[in-house]
Amino acid sequence: MKKSREKTDRFIILSGFIGALTFLLAIAVSGALYPGYNHVSMVISELGASDSPVHLIMNIFGFGLLGVLTALFALGVYRSPELHIAGKFSSIFFFITGILMILVAISPTYTDIGIYAPDDLHQLAVIWQFPVLTIALLLFAFDAWQNKKLRILAPVILAVGAITLILGYNYLAVWPPPIPVGIIQRLTIGLAYALVAAISIMLYKVQFNTPLKKILLGAAVIVIISLAVALPQQLEINDSHANQPTLRGLCYGLEECNQYCQNRYGTCSQICQQEPENQLCGRIAVLRTGG
């Protein structure tokens, strides 16, 4: 019975680490199977959008699986003997983060990306993940500071968390963002879940006194595979976009921007209001006709 509980605890504590890796792999594979998908100019939600050719793969094995594994990780945090009141309380917010990610999976985006719709469950689930996960990380950092074996996590969480908050603000509150949306979104989400992964693997090491070489080697293999899958298509897209006019990295050239703005009038209109000198603004059909 004791061995069975320990196996369960090992798995659920490591779920935070596994979730981050499977999410990375799901993005890479889905992007490679989506013709013309651009990791620089397109957000991750577009992989799971209702009209995406890979929406089932991304929503099940990307958003959905990450949500389930994050919720399981929350249970592992709650059951860990290494943590006290603040750490146990953080598990509630980790669990809510997992549920919000599951909601992202079951409510594919339909709206014009960049225009906030208060009744859009997908956008609400995306937006609320950041403050909820922030609370979870802060509570865990406070608890970790009181545990000598976990103390190193506290300054890491605070430093990386501060960077993530700045990126998140520029991604969610400043639209269109100052750098290509695909990059700023991936940095924001990537750093946030990298912290979850770091907590997961460090708690696993401390609680079970287990070497991490094999686990980290496996993680490195998954990262390398993900890059190998995603990079060829992205490099090809980057080459085709060289020296072409762009709308803040969201689309390149008149033909592509005409197609992009057809379904994203609000985003393109905002950019052209902010950058009236952009040569594409007076040539994109939907902007000339006013939608």
Image (tube, rainbow, N blue to C red):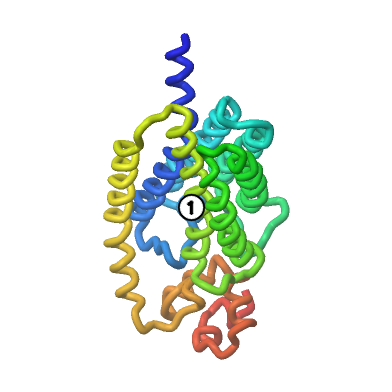
Q: Is residue 9 above or below residue 86?
A: above
User: Amino acid type of disc 1?
Assistant: Asp
Point out residue 53 in the picture as x, y percentages from the top left corner: 41, 50
Give the left or right position of residue 31, taking residue 50 as reference.
left
Which residue is at 60% across, 64% downward?
Answer: 166
Q: State the residue at coordinates (51%, 51%).
A: 49
- Asked whether, in this view, residue 214 is left or right of residue 118, the answer is left
Residue 123 in view: no
In the rendering, at what x and y percent does residue 182 appear?
48, 63
Q: Residue 145, position in %: x, y?
A: 60, 43
Crowd around label 1: few <14 · some 14–19 · many ≥20 (10 Å): few
Dividing the image into 4 quarters, which one contains the C terminus? bottom right
Which residue is the extreme one toward the front?
Answer: 148
Give 78 or 64, whichever is nearer the viewer. Answer: 78
Is residue 8 visible in the rendered image? The answer is yes
Judge left or right: residue 100 versus residue 42: right
> Where is residue 186 shown, x and y percent of the image?
48, 58
Q: Secondary structure at mark 1?
A: loop
Label count reads 1
Q: Residue at x 34, y 49 (%)?
A: 29
Query: Please, which residue is most extreme toward the right here?
Result: 118
Viewer-nearest residue: 54 or 6: 6
- Badge 1 is on which residue? 51
Tell me what residue is drawn at x 50 percent, y 88 percent. Answer: 279
Up/down of 63 relative to 264, above or below: above
Q: Residue furthest top?
A: 1
